[in-house]
Image: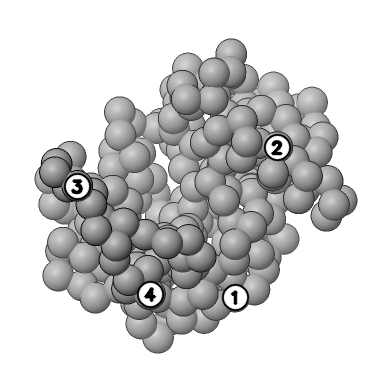
Amino acid sequence: MSKYSIIITAGGIGKRMGSDIPKQFIEIAGKPILMHTLELFFKYDMNAQLILTLPTEWKEYWQDILQKHTCFIPHIIVDGGDERYHSIKNALKICTGDFIVVHDGVRPLVSTETLSRCFTAVEKHDQVIPVIQLNESLRQVFDDGSKAVKRTEYCIVQTPQCFKRNVLETAYNMPFHEGITDDASLVEQAGFVIHLVEGNSENIKITSKMDLEVASTCLSRMI
């Protein structure tokens, strides 16, 4: 049995994409985005406990997709909640690993190197997230203007976000509030210090049609 439980979050319905189906089910490079993501984690650790959070009304649709693509990767499906917080809380109830990894289902381009850095670091630091540096200039905006800020003092957060099991459970014992932006922010609010590792620039979260085109190009080159 693997020491890792991997929660792949796909509980949203992707209204911003303007598609008839949730964005995680849109096909690129011959497969739904979510299937690409599921496959990459299975290839990385075939023994890991894989858990998908899905909108309740789309669970049957996912089963049809699995049959269509003859995908037999073992995984558990749990109901997605109203917010990401509730989806993760549902999944935590069935996690068995010593370490829990949370990844966006619409990030199918996380590299093996990023996964290795995250999985290695979490065993030492207990709470780890991948980040990339900013390449563009950055400004802070106010009601009456703006000012330039040092981009070296900021970074872009990615997933997978990895935690020792008791750390994430402690964080999710805190009640939901609107200030929760991701798992790391909640863990930080619970009093834990987040350790950063290098991510990869291709590891984009697909939220727009432009993202879809970029991901499609990248995945097609990998096949």
* Residue 78 rendering spot, x and y as whole percentages: 44, 36
Give the camera-side residue of 47 and 148. Answer: 148
5 on left or right of 151: right
* Residue where numbered disc 2 is placed: 213
- Could one spot residue 51 in this view of the protein? no
Q: Is residue 84 above or below residue 18?
A: below
Residue 170 figure quarter: bottom left
Q: Is 84 on the left-hand or right-hand side of 159?
A: left
Q: Which amino acid is tagged 1?
A: Ser
Residue assigned mark 4: 152
Q: Earlier in the sequence, mark 4 or mark 2?
A: 4
* Relative depth, front residue between 49 and 199: 199
Q: CA distance from mark 1 to mark 2?
A: 27 Å
Q: Which residue is mark 1?
A: 116
Can residue 123 be seen? yes
Q: Nearer the viewer, mark 3 or mark 4?
A: 3
Query: What residue is shown with label 3?
Result: 145
Q: Is residue 164 left or right of residue 219?
A: left
